[in-house]
Image (spheres, rainbow, N blue to C red):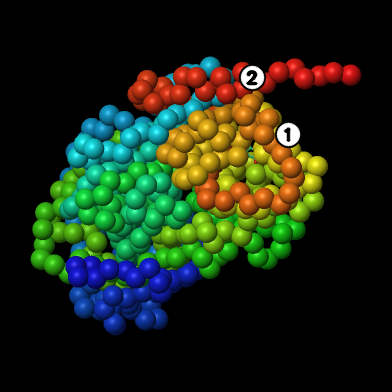
Amino acid sequence: MTGSSTPAEGLHGGFGNHFSSEAVPGALPQGRNSPQRAPFGLYAELLSGTAFTAPRHANQRTWLYRRQPSVRSGPYAPMAHALLKTGSKDGVDIPPDPLRWHPIPLANESLDFVDGLRTMVVNGDPDAQTGVAVHLYGASRPMGNRAFVDVDGELLLIPQEGALRVTTELGVLHAAPGEIVLLPRGMLFKVDPAVPGESVRGYVCENYGAAFRLPELGPIGSNGLANTRDFLAPHAAYDDGPAQPWELVRKFGGTLWRAPAQASPFNVVAWHGNLTPYVYDTRRFNTIGTVSFDHPDPSIFTVLTSPSDTPGWANCDFVIFPPRWMVAEDTFRPPWYHRNVMSECMGLVHGQYDAKEEGFRPGGLSLHNSMVPHGPDADAFNKASAAELAPRKLDNTLAFMVESRWRLRPTAFALNGGHLDKSYADCWAPLQDNFKV
Ligand SMILES: O=C(O)Cc1cc(O)ccc1O
Ligand SMILES: [Fe+2]
């Protein structure tokens, strides 16, 4: 990896594909996974993402050929992190009101990606492999010789400010706002500002449940929404410099643990498999909407889904609200007023969200828990009720939603950290009873 960087073009494409990659020609064993001696003195190591006996269509694993096996690290000692939380046990009780947070200013303290994580909402329990968390990240410096691995869940990074360089065991990915990065459970990585000296900010969805997959398309057919080939996996790249001290940070059972390592863990020279990180550009999302009337359910905007044991009732749906044409006739075009059984946590990467043109700001967050009434604010209602219904492009915008079947509990930091929008509910106060017969 020293002296090498992954070009944005030419990555492997295809969600769930089986890829092969070697940074040194001949480093990948052919015809078998664990030859008596792996090429060039490398160690063979398996990383499984599903149980060995998971059905073939869901089975995920990757074979790594590396300079040192991962077991060459430790012992681990607890590492304090005041604001990184896990599962519903780390959430607080809240009244069933809609909640919203102002963006947290870009980090001006010296924080790396791990130090700068702040958990906002949590549910479930990683020991039961259910639930999600939504964290905010804010980093002003690179991780240096520090690698992070999350055993509690896979991570979906949603950059909001500043581009990221994400180094993983399988190679390097770059992601700017508008792109997202999926990091499998148990795979080591580090996240650095792509531009040295620049501060970065964004969101992280941590998924303790079944791995994210593409949603079923039903009557949409065989194409559409997030297309398989647009998920890009890295090429093998490894640190080829001399051994240096590293620190490994492992999130394991809701606690952070740290261990020294004598050399870089990014030492995988070749790999093959289908358990890989991905970068996905949301501009590739094939957005589908009504061409007649009514506001469709937002499930048409699902990028990735983590199913629960109940069909159709997701542990987590990751949904985006990308630029799109609004053409519906005789229709109130923004979202309707609603109470949903699913709990909804929303963020804004850039632009404006049509239900809340003011108040919901890029980098901010909102939470509408199960059955909590919400919908367009009074301004959006008045504007959309009176608007001339010509075709209109909703442009320069990207909002997203992490939706879960389980109630999302805010953390104590979310409630008391100084970023809660205490007057959120006022945005609906002007709505009057306009009923007249
Ligand atoms: O509350 C929200 O803004 C998210 C949302 C959007 C939409 O188009 C329909 C339902 C819904 O919950
Ligand atoms: Fe909603």
Q: Where is residue 308 in the image (x, y as percent from the top left)?
A: 58, 43
Q: Is residue 120 above or below residue 159?
A: above
Say few, some or many: other residues with alpha carbon within 10 Å of mark 2 (under 14 / 14 to 19 / 20 or more). Answer: few
The quadrant where ligand 1 appears is top right
Tell me where residue 220 sits by quadrant. bottom right
Q: Viewed as shown, does residue 294 lie left or right of 338?
A: right
Distance from the alpha carbon under mark 1 to that under mark 2? 15 Å
Q: Is residue 7 above or below residue 358?
A: below
The residue shown at (15%, 59%) is: 263
The residue shown at (89%, 19%) is: 437
Which type of secondary structure does the marked residue at label 1 adopt? Answer: helix
- Asked whether residue 431 is in view, the answer is yes
Q: In this view, does 394 lie above or below 171?
A: above
Q: Position of residue 135 (x, y in %)?
A: 40, 38
Residue named by callout 1: 385
The residue shown at (28%, 52%) is: 193
- Asked whether residue 154 is in view, the answer is no
Q: Position of residue 305 (x, y in %)?
A: 56, 49
Query: Can you tell which mark lies on residue 121?
Result: none
Q: Where is residue 196 in the image (x, y as percent from the top left)?
A: 22, 54
Which type of secondary structure does the marked residue at label 2 adopt? Answer: loop
Q: In this view, does 104 lie above or below 2?
A: above
Q: Viewed as shown, does residue 251 lie left or right of 368?
A: left
Residue named by callout 2: 430
Q: Which amino acid does label 2 sit on?
A: Pro
The residue shown at (51%, 65%) is: 230
